[in-house]
Image: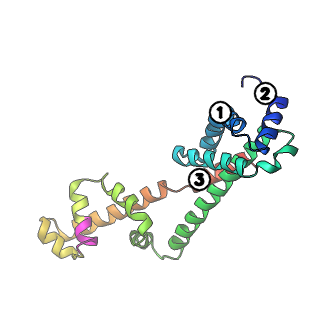
Amino acid sequence: MAIYNLFEEKVLLEQISGGDEVAFRRVFELYKKTILTFVDNFIHSSEDAEEIVQETFLILWNNRQSLTGIEHPRNYIYTIARNKCYDYLAKMARNQKAMRHAWENSQEALNETELLLNSKESIMLINHALLKLSAQKQSVFRMSRYDDMSHEEIALATGLSRSRVKNIIVEVLKHLKVRLKQASVLSVLYCLFTLFR
């Protein structure tokens, strides 16, 4: 709809409240693209944005009996979408808080990464981050962490010095910590909540 027609949209909501699926599809077609853009800009995740849009319209349909009193349909739909975004971001924040809590309980930066290595949720991120490293660094790290080899055993297997093996492992752990922090949504949450207060 090129021009916002409040009367027409209120009529559509009244029709939806009576169970009119055609009116519901019309409202969905009117708003799906703009709601998707709004949600995607809010949470910065295209896949999750599509799911939130579907949930938004599902809520609209499930609450159809209460639509007759809505004065501003557009605001009502955007409010549902915004609340679903807040729910999504709160869930992400809880996950991030749990991860940060594990880091804060650790004494050293390297131990923080060690804790994350044991986390099933981090395995995919870690494997992806390892792919960014040279084959030598990947090999040394895998021998150390997955094959449980000592620095001396790795040095013998690779022909590297023991100190070089130790340095590689430290470098890889630092790299992993940086990559895992980059995956963090805390900075996104801060910006969004600041903008939409």
| Residue 29 numbered tag | 1
- 130 vs 155, left or right, is right
Residue 13 in magenta stretch: no
What is the distance, in whole Å, between disc 3 and disc 2 at their CAs?
Answer: 35 Å
Mark 1 residue type: Glu
Q: Is residue 182 above or below residue 29?
A: below
Residue 83 location (% of width, % of height): 71, 52
Q: In which quadrant is the N terminus drawn?
A: top right
Q: SS of the residue at dot 2?
A: loop
Q: Residue furthest top?
A: 2
Residue beneath the point at 69% across and 47% down = 81
Of labels 1 and 2, the one closer to you:
1
Observer-side mark, 3 or 2, equals 2
Read off the residue under disc 2. 4
Residue drawn at (52%, 77%) of the image? 105
Q: In the image, which residues are magenta? A: 141-147
Pointer 3: what residue? 187
Residue drawn at the location 54% of the way across and 67% of the way down: 100
